[in-house]
Amino acid sequence: MRANINLIHGDCMEAMREMKDESIDLIITDPPYNIGQSNKRTKVGDKIISNKEAWGEWDDFDNKEFDEFMFNLLKECKRILKEGVSFYCFTAREKNGFYCDYACHNLGFTYQNTIAMIKENPLPRFTKTNWRIAFELAFYISKGKPKTFNFINQQKMVNVQKYVIGKKESTHPTEKPLKVFKLLIEASSNEKDLVLDPFMGSGTTAISCWDLKRDCITYDTSKEYYDKACDRLKRHQSQGQLF
């Protein structure tokens, strides 16, 4: 039986408040990083543009407002996760430890590990005043001791995963590599489990769950990216049926 994949155009925080306690088997997400106001550069397709141009208003918060946003997100995630399940959250490098510490020390999550995604072709440093940025981080925490951890093999199960930037299936500026998300989901859930991604983005979580036969629910406030994620999922499903 195929997975039940629900892509929803809406506010994840409003939706999560309506969810039942301990109803989710895994959360994996890539929320805004609050770097939309930055003049640093990123790669979208074949173009190198400023973060402000790439992200825009949806990733531009007042710093205090953004911290409150993340704290509230983590609180809701703790409530709706079942006991003994996992939570992967990507964040900006500068704040990864800060939000992880808050989740563990203030909310009672258990720290498990930190996942690093290494960019094999990082962007050049145009101003040459600092190190090139070649990795992204996610904190891996759990609600109690994880009941599910599917150790695949020694080669795959390392907390450093490499990928090539620029090889995307969508125009979303923060599309995450499908290979990495599938590995995290396969490791920390089982078939027919319900996976939540509060921030749909390009739809990578939804596609991963479809391939791995996990049920999935994911949200995005942007109608543009919601439509594009739906189209991407449909194309992926069609290609799977073709082969």
Image (cartoon, rainbow, N blue to C red):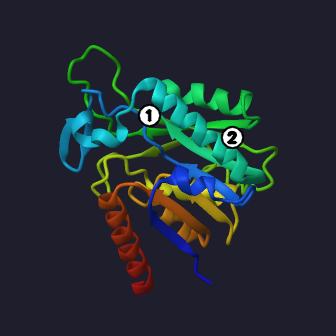
With respect to residue 103, does 182 lie above or below? below
* For the residues bearing labels 1 and 2, Cβ distance under 8 angstroms: no
Residue on which disc 2 sits: 141
On-image quarter of the N terminus: bottom right
Mark 2 Cα within 10 Å, few/some/many (few <14, many 20+)?
Answer: many
Q: Secondary structure at mark 2?
A: strand
Residue at horizontal 24%, vertical 17%?
128
Badge 1 amino acid:
Phe
With respect to residue 41, does 224 lie above or below? below
On screen, residue 103 versus residue 132, left or right, reads right
Residue on which disc 1 sits: 135
**Where's residue 132, x and y in %?**
33, 25
**Where's residue 66, x and y in %?**
47, 31
Sequence order check, earlier mark of 1 and 2: 1
**Where's residue 184, x and y in %?**
60, 53
Q: Which labelled disc corresponds to residue 71?
A: none
On screen, residue 157 versus residue 47, left or right, reads right
Residue at horizontal 63%, vertical 60%?
186
Do we see residue 159 in this rendering? Answer: no
Residue furthest top in the image: 129
Considering depth in this image, is 43 or 194 the residue closer to the camera?
Answer: 194
With respect to residue 176, does 135 lie above or below? above
Badge 2 amino acid:
Ile
Q: CA distance from mark 1 to mark 2?
A: 20 Å
**Where's residue 193, x and y in %?**
68, 67
Considering depth in this image, is 113 or 198 the residue closer to the camera?
Answer: 198
Considering depth in this image, is 105 or 92 the residue closer to the camera?
Answer: 105
Residue at horizontal 17%, vertical 44%?
47
With respect to residue 76, does 137 lie above or below? above
**What is the quadrant of residue 108 in the picture?**
top right
